[in-house]
């Protein structure tokens, strides 16, 4: 396996890694144990990786990071919504 | 800002992103809402990024991924330990 292939597989894995957490949070409607800062910092970092990929015209880097950004933005949205629902439920 | 600087900042951010989740899980002793698959898949991906960095003799890539791998291995360990403690507590 040459370096480029290793890099592509690595990128695919680190991009796909968000999916199980998105699915679990969607299924359980629970995000209390999640730190919002992980997806927020990851998203900022991945925007920079996206810019880096565009500067280098590196398609895998662009596609991998676009996919991850969408996943983590969905996760951030769910974290905010489900935590708010938790608070309202506690008040009732 | 040139491409290399953007790449270094992106790498630092995506590596550092694990820290808030590790700290939160350590503080709350709660990991129920976390999917174990995210850190597991990320760790496998980051081992490949580490191999990629070694092949390219790219020090930032090596350092960033070593740091992240340690963070996510700690997170996986806490997830297993705290979930087991949860189950034992439910049984008592």
Image (cartoon, coloured by chain):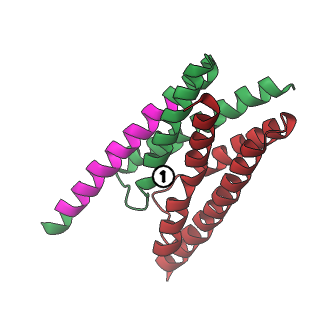
Chain colours: A red, B green
- Give residue B88's quadrant in the image: bottom left
Q: Is residue A41 above or below residue B89?
A: above
The percent coordinates of residue B60 (x first, y second) are: 63, 21
Which residue does the image show at 55% across and 67% down from the upper left? A83
| Residue A36 can be seen, yes or no | no
Q: Residue furthest bottom?
A: A92
Q: Which residues are magenta?
A: B67-88
| Circle 1 residues within 10 Å: few <14, some 14–19, many ≥20 | many
| Residue B25 can be seen, yes or no | yes
- Which quarter of the rendered picture does the N terminus of chain A lie within? top right
B43 or B53, which lies in front? B53
- Give residue B74's quadrant in the image: top left
The percent coordinates of residue A57 (x first, y second) are: 85, 38
Which residue does the image show at 57% across and 45% down from the upper left? A14
Q: Considering the whole magenta stretch, tell me its main secondary structure.
A: helix
Residue pointed to by mark 1: B38
Magenta stretch holds residue A43 = no
Which residue does the image show at 65% across and 35% down from the upper left? B13
The percent coordinates of residue A46 (x first, y second) are: 71, 44
Q: Residue furthest front?
A: A1
Magenta stretch holds residue B82 = yes
**Left or right: where does residue B53 sit relative to residue A32?**
right
The percent coordinates of residue B66 (x first, y second) are: 49, 27
Indicate the chain on which mark 1 is placed. B
Which residue does the image show at 46% across and 40% down from the upper left? B43
Q: Is residue B80 above or below residue B72?
A: below
**Left or right: where does residue A40 sit relative to residue B33?**
right
Q: Secondary structure at mark 1?
A: helix
């Amino acid at each position: 396996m040459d370096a480029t292939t290793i890099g592509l597989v690595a990128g695919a894995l680190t991009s796909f890694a968000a999916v199980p957490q998105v699915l679990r949070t969607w299924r359980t409607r629970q995000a209390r144990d999640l730190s919002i800062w992980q997806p927020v910092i990851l998203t900022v970092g991945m925007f920079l990786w996206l810019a880096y990929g565009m500067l280098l015209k590196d398609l895998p880097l662009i596609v991998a990071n676009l996919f991850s950004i969408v996943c983590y933005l969905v996760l951030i949205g769910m974290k905010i919504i489900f935590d708010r629902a938790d608070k309202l439920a506690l008040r009732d």
